Every structure is written in structure tokens, then in C-alpha cells.
Amino acid sequence: MANTLHMVGPPSFDQKPGDQGYDPFDDLWSRLARPMEVASSVSALVGLPVKEVQQLAGIKIAASPEADKLLDTFPRTIRSLATSMKQTAERCIGSLRGPVLWSETISARAASFGNPDVFVCQTPSRAYDIDENRVLVWALLQVREAAERATEGTHSRYDDRVMKAVRRNGNDAARFAEHPSLSAVVRERPKLRALKRTRMGRKRDAYGPALDCLDRAAEPLTAQDVRLLCDERTRVQHEVLMKICHRLERHGNRLPEFRVERGALYSGPVQYYHGRRLGDREKMSGIVIGNLLVDVPDRINDPSRSRAEAQLQSRAGGRKIAVVVNDDDIDAAVTMAIDLARSR
């Protein structure tokens, strides 16, 4: 996860509008293509700047219970590190510490004026650069890097106690990653095989906190975390967006998962541009279906449809428009979009 955070998990399309317990945001969240880059995806969803989302994700990782447990149990973990044995060549004078490597010994004696007491032996030594310890080091680095992102240009709205915990955990993680036993361990993202081996190994209990921390780093923001970042208009936009998607799917195949491109969400012919993310109310924002721009009024429950249509037209960029104030408008917008696509 070096500088990129990825969410993982299979999407679910089980529920539809009208079903008991259906939630449009959960539906939209489940349709985001995985793995996804958290900062750009959440920014496109709720309109916050990418840097602010990165900071929030950093706080969620560095101050998480998983990070606390990883750091609290580190003194015990370091005493029970998994190791392997490796053979190294060691120069010995007047003694033998293992099988003699005669070709190396002859070279060494030639370099020491034929000293017959010089031997090069093959000696066993402990190796710490193995999969389990790469997982441990990578987890520590994720906490350290998350703390760095979280404390960069810290906004005053974040609780001081939380930020103190973030800084403390970041400092501890950086210090622990430089422990002498771990200093020679490669600093790179562990492969799936390494994760599986660590999870299934005989010392899986010792490395459990590191695995849990990596799971948290892979998905630092939950659907509930992101939902809380949505204002009222954004929530209504998400509801309209998902109702449009389901209505389009009645007329054809299931739409592909949403992907993020240039600050917008794309799913087949459907695109979603968050106005706050674009930063300019005159720029095109809303829900695009082919050559049709659909959106709710700038002010929710605005009684003037004509005013809402004029505001939407001003940022439509020559597209046809459809203002949505009720479900009938959604049906009309989908019909209009299909007719426009067929007439091309």
C-alpha cells in the first residue's frame, strides 16, 4: 500500500430499490470496482479533496485498534520471530566452524601469502528475511506512512487526542521497523503467497496482529465512514443515480462496476460528476446518461422547477437536461436517454 490505499471485497447486487432494507449508498458502494484507490474513489463519491480523504484514511489506519494491537504486542512478537537457516561462507584462522570450502580457502590463502591456518568454512546462521517477517515489516510501514499522511497539514477539526495517538503510533512503528532483527528484511509489499503462508504458518498467532493491520490498511474507510461525509444533496444524488442504474438494467444487461476516471464515476453509459469535487458550479456536474444530463435541484425541495432547469442548463454543455424532483421524473429521464441513444 506504499502511497496507495486499496479497498478489496466482492461487490453485491442482491437488493434493489423498493426491497426491505435497501440503501442506495450501500448499493453504489458495492458497485465500485475492486481493488480501488480510496482517495480518488471517495473524492468522486462525496466531493471532498483527494488530500483530505488521504488524511482521513491515514487517521483511520494509524489510530485503529489493529494498529494499537500490532504495536502493543510487538515486544512479544519480536521474541518469537520466525527464522530460517542459511549457509554463509566465513573466513576462519586456526579453527574450523563448518565444512571447508576448498576453492575459497585456496583463494584466501593465496591472498594471505600462503598462510596454512586460513580456512573458509560454510557456517549456518539465522535468516530473518522470510515471508512472515516481510509481512510484519510491511504492516509497520503502513502504520508509519498512514501517520505521515494523517499529520501532514492537520486540520483543526480533528480531535487532539486522536492526533496524539496517530503520532505516537507512527513514531513507534517507524522505530520498531528498524529493530536489528528486522533491519535486513526487504521493504516491499508481500505477495499473496507470503500472506497465505503467514496466515497458515505455525506462528500465525504471533503474526496475526500484522495480518489484521494489513487488512485494515486495505480498507481504511468503511461504507459507514464514507456515508457520514455525504451532505443531503449528495445523498439524494446517489439515490437518483442508483434508481437510474436499475431502470436502465431493466431495458438491457447489468451495468458494469463503477470505475473512477478524471474525478468522475463511470459505469457504461452512466457517469456521475460531483459538483463540489469539481470546485466550480459552472462546470458540468450531475448524472450523465449518453447525451442527457440529469440532476436534482441545486437546492433540495426547490419549489421552482423552471429555476432548477435554468441552473442545470447553464452547466449542461449543450446536452439535453432532465431535472429530478420525484420518481416520475426518473422514469421520464431514462426514457429520454434511451430515445436519444436510439436516434443517434
Image: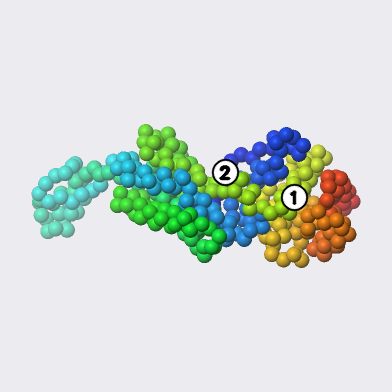
In this rendering, position of residue 68 left or right of residue 307: left
User: Tag 2: residue type?
Assistant: Val
> In this orientation, which residue lies closer to the viewer: 238 or 137?
238
Q: Which mark is residue 105?
A: none
Q: Which residue is mark 1?
A: 236
User: Tag 1: Cα neighbours inside 10 Å, few (<14), some, or many (≥20)?
Assistant: some
Looking at the image, which residue is at 20% across and 49% down?
Answer: 90
| Disc 2 and disc 1 in contact, CB within 8 angstroms | no
User: Tag 1: residue type?
Assistant: Val
In this rendering, position of residue 145 left or right of residue 229: left
Looking at the image, which residue is at 58% across and 59% down?
Answer: 52
> In this orientation, which residue lies closer to the viewer: 240 or 95?
240
Quote the CA–CA distance across marks 2 and 1.
26 Å
For mark 2, give the secondary structure: loop
User: Tag 2: Cα neighbours inside 10 Å, few (<14), some, or many (≥20)?
Assistant: some
Looking at the image, which residue is at 53% across and 58% down?
Answer: 158
User: Is residue 86 in sight in this rendering?
Assistant: no
- Residue 267 appears at what percent x and percent y? 72, 48
In this rendering, position of residue 186 left or right of residue 159: left
- The quadrant holding residue 315 is bottom right
Q: Viewer-nearest of labels 2 and 1?
A: 1
Q: Which residue is mark 2?
A: 8
User: Is residue 303 in sight in this rendering?
Assistant: yes
> In this orientation, which residue lies closer to the viewer: 194 or 6?
6
Looking at the image, which residue is at 88% across and 59% down?
Answer: 306
In this rendering, position of residue 322 left or right of residue 108: right
- Residue 31 appears at what percent x and percent y? 67, 43
- Residue 118 appears at what percent x and percent y? 13, 51
- Residue 342 appears at what percent x and percent y? 88, 48
